Amino acid sequence: MPSLPRPLQLIPVFGGRSGEVDPMPQRPLRSKIPPMSTVKEELIRLIQDQPDDSSQEEILRELAFAAMVERGIADSDAGRVISNEEMARRIESWRK
């Protein structure tokens, strides 16, 4: 049976110009991970957090998901984002 994702702890993110609203006002809190942890330590922690009866496929899927989330957060932090409207236009163009 696949493991259920653990709930994320959220913290508000402030920034930008005065009066500007952050379109994504909350981000996952990563304080559970020591700031100096290595990639290897993080992967070990992710594996250890899985149920003992997890399959290799389930563990690999969890590791891939964690990598995609980190990549998405890095993209967002670097400003590599598009609006919901732009994404809707792109999806609509795929249907043609």
Image (tube, rainbow, N blue to C red):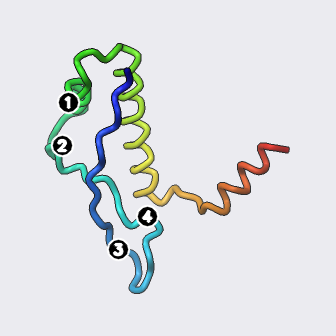
| Local crowd size for mark 3, using a 10 Å CA cut-off: few (<14), some (14–19), many (≥20) | few
Q: Which amino acid is tagged 1?
A: Arg
- Marks 1,3: beta carbons within 8 A: no
Residue 83 is marked as none
Residue 49 coordinates in the image, percent (x, y): 22, 29
Q: Earlier in the sequence, mark 2 or mark 4?
A: 4
Q: CA distance from mark 3 to mark 2?
A: 23 Å
Q: State the residue in front, 55 or 22.
A: 55
Secondary structure state at the residue bearing disc 2: loop
Q: CA distance from mark 3 to mark 4?
A: 11 Å
- Marks 2,1: beta carbons within 8 A: yes
* Residue annotated with mark 3: 15
* Residue annotated with mark 4: 24
- Dot in front, 1 or 3: 1
Q: CA distance from mark 4 to mark 1?
A: 27 Å
Side (left or right) of 70 relative to 45 = right
Q: Residue 48: name its quadrant.
A: top left
* Residue annotated with mark 2: 33
| Local crowd size for mark 4, using a 10 Å CA cut-off: few (<14), some (14–19), many (≥20) | few
Q: Earlier in the sequence, mark 4 or mark 1?
A: 4
Residue at 32 percent across and 67 percent down: it is 13
